[in-house]
Structures are given as C-alpha cells and as structure tokens.
Amino acid sequence: LDRWAPSEKPVPDFRRETAFRWIGGERSGQGYLSVLPQRGGCRLADLQGIDRQKIELDLNTRQFIDG
C-alpha cells in the first residue's frame, strides 16, 4: 500500500534556497521540488562566448515574470 499512498514531500524554503529540481511524478503528479546544492556565485557576466544565449535568457526571463 505504501507505493500507492501519497508520501510526505519536503516543502522547499523559497526564502533561503535559490535553485530547485523537480523529482519524479511526471505521470502521477506526486513529484516534488528538491533543493540543488549551492555552487558558488556565477554571474551572467562571467559567462563568455554565449552572447546570443544570454540575450535569449534575459528575454525569456522577462516574459516569464511579466506573465
């Protein structure tokens, strides 16, 4: 029965953590967000040779925020 019963999922702390990964539940909807470990700061300016991708990332992020 444990396989079918929903289990307690960790509740992410969005105030403390900045990066998450969706784990499982693609079909069942029983997935959850898992915190990704911090890997030190990486600024957008640190990334070299990907100017087109940085522009696209910026546009996509702004569109996402705007709804």
Image (cartoon, rainbow, N blue to C red):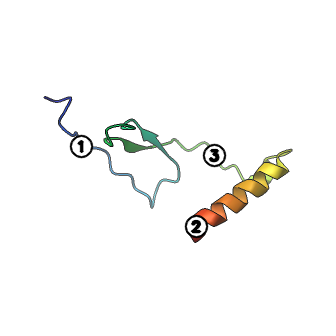
The kind of secondary structure element at disc 3 is loop
Taking depth in this image into account, of 54 and 28 the one nearest to the observer is 28
Q: Position of residue 6 (x, y in %)?
A: 21, 40
Q: Please, is residue 21 above or below residue 55 in the view?
A: above
Mark 1 or mark 2, whichever is nearer to me: 2
Between the C-alphas of marks 1 and 3, the distance is 30 Å
The residue lying at 13 percent from left, 28 percent from top is 1
Give the residue type at disc 2: Ile
The residue singled out by tag 2 in the image is 65
Judged from this view, the residue extending furthest toward the left is 1
Camera-nearest label, 3 or 2 = 2
In screen coordinates, is 10 left or right of 66?
Answer: left
In the picture, the disc for residue 40 is 3
Q: Tell me which residue sits at (71%, 60%) in the image.
A: 58
Position of residue 18 in the picture relative to residue 33 (left or right) = right
Name the residue type under label 1: Glu
Q: CA distance from mark 3 to mark 2?
A: 25 Å
Q: Which residue was labeled with disc 1?
A: 8
The circle on residue 59 is: none
Q: Earlier in the sequence, mark 1 or mark 3?
A: 1
Q: Amino acid at mark 3?
A: Gly
At 58% across and 67% down in the image, what residue appears? 65
